[in-house]
Image: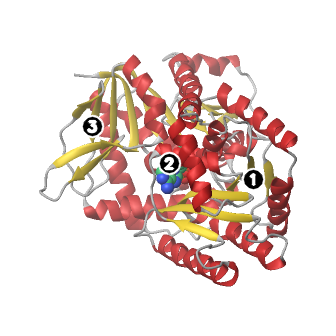
Amino acid sequence: MTYDLVVVANRLPVDRVVDEDGAVSWRRSPGGLVTAIEPIMQEYDGAWVGWDGGPDGPDEPLDQNGMLLVPVPLSAAEIEEFYEGFSNGTLWPLYHDVVAKPSFHREWWDAYVTVNRRFAERAAALAAENALVWVHDYQLQLVPAMLREARPDLRIGFFLHIPFPPTELFVQLPWRRQILEGLLGADLVGFQRPGGAQNFVRLVRQRVGHKTHRDLVYLADGRTVEADAFPISIDFAGLAEMAQTDAVVARAREIREQLGNPRHLLLGVDRLDYTKGIYTRLRAFGELLADGRVDLEDAVFLQVATPSRERVDEYRRLRDEIDMLVGRINGDYGRLGHPAISYLHNSFPREEMAAMFRAADIMVVTPLRDGMNLVAKEYVACRVDNDGALVLSEFAGAADELKQAFLINPYDINGMKTALLEAMDGQPRDRSRRMRAMRKTVKEHDVAAWAAEFMGRLREVRPDHHKRLREVPTDDNQ
Ligand code: ADQ
């Protein structure tokens, strides 16, 4: 059995859960990618290749809601070297402006190659003649070329969910050329922002020596590769509908009451990651309390930070640093039963997230670097009342679209403090004008539009596309 569409992503859209008696079941993971891709998977005859999240998982495919899910098993050593190591200890920090220092280890690279090959082999065996294959994210950048070699008939798309770094940073990578050549196996390479596509095209021109013209790369074998921005989005209608339910509205009220009905409730929701700027954001809030420009009656901060990648040292250190900062701010400025910052590590159901978004007057999203940041868009979708203010880092991809947010530079603590005060003091009419505009933007470009745009472009790729080479007589290699 072969499939007309094969999605290849590091994770499957389900988690494998083993209960106390050793019984195995699968739980749909709540990620946005599933919501985006499920309708397309049903439209085509789709298969999804990915890891189940644990060591030595099963090897048999399973059927779920009309999708074939094909697990790629990883050993404990591969999880350490490929996933925690090369993906999250090398590529993640390197691609996020070197906010943390990337580690370069040759064994990690070897594991990356081995695991990428396993993913590529699975996909090659599943894809029908001329099928579309959509490969996702930084963990699988070698898959397009490996797949191309085995199956030249396929139309291969790649989408990078995280930023693609400036050339000066990318060239630190000892395996820079292999990564670029891996990506060039695709027909279409998608990025969150236009800058990512530009960085990629410049690198393949300068470092691999291919001819390029605007967003096209011309390979020696006559094939062309197109690079472009496809900013990802969210299920706007689904979230907006959920945010209007009586249950969510009542829960939002309850959350505010539990936090002492402050005049301003500030909210942060992130994976506990050093790229998200949680530390500087809480420091800015702490300084506003210290300066006396804000007091406990004015504002409280609810910060939700779900621990992730806890076996990576950098993440453990970050967790300790934030724990200490929250403790210090609460110790200095909190009162009995009334902390300045409520800090939670839980992972919440969608309804509870929607209630928090509706409860919050100010959403504080301050990443030092972020591919997109879906939380900013989710907040906007949930504000069916056209109220609420968004403080947003200009270094998040979302800043390209959410221009009416209070945009900040997360490295500028004073600037961040000023923006927080402005958001708190804003006039209701100005708030509503900004929110309406942002809601319109996200509504018009939701996740279905994102997926349809990418798939539409991939479908246009023709096996004879090398003809375009002759149509472009000049190149911009100078
Ligand atoms: P992430 O770095 O994970 O994604 P983000 O885009 O904010 O960042 O997505 C996080 C998702 O997890 C959101 O849907 C959010 O609602 C959810 N979430 C966060 N905390 C939660 C909690 N405590 N309980 C339940 N849900 C929670 C990567 C890139 C981003 C890019 C996305 C998609 O780093 O830049 O936007 O992929 O491409």
Left or right, 213 with reference to 6: right
* For marks 3 and 1 on the same chain, the one whose residue lies earlier in the sequence: 3
Residue 468 lies in quadrant: top right
What crowding class fits label 1: few (fewer than 14 Cα within 10 Å), some (14-19), or many (20 or more)? many
Secondary structure of residue under mark 3: strand
Image point (75%, 62%), residue name: 410
Q: CA distance from mark 1 to mark 2?
A: 21 Å
Ligand 1: does it lie within 8 Å of the C-beta at label 2? Answer: yes
Name the quarter where the C terminus is drawn.
top right
Image point (27%, 37%), residue name: 70
Q: Position of residue 117 (x, y in %)?
A: 33, 46
Q: Position of residue 84 (x, y in %)?
A: 41, 63
Ligand 1: does it lie within 8 Å of the C-beta at label 3? Answer: no
Nearer to me, 136 or 277: 277
Disc 2 marks which residue? 352
Nearer to me, 177 or 473: 177
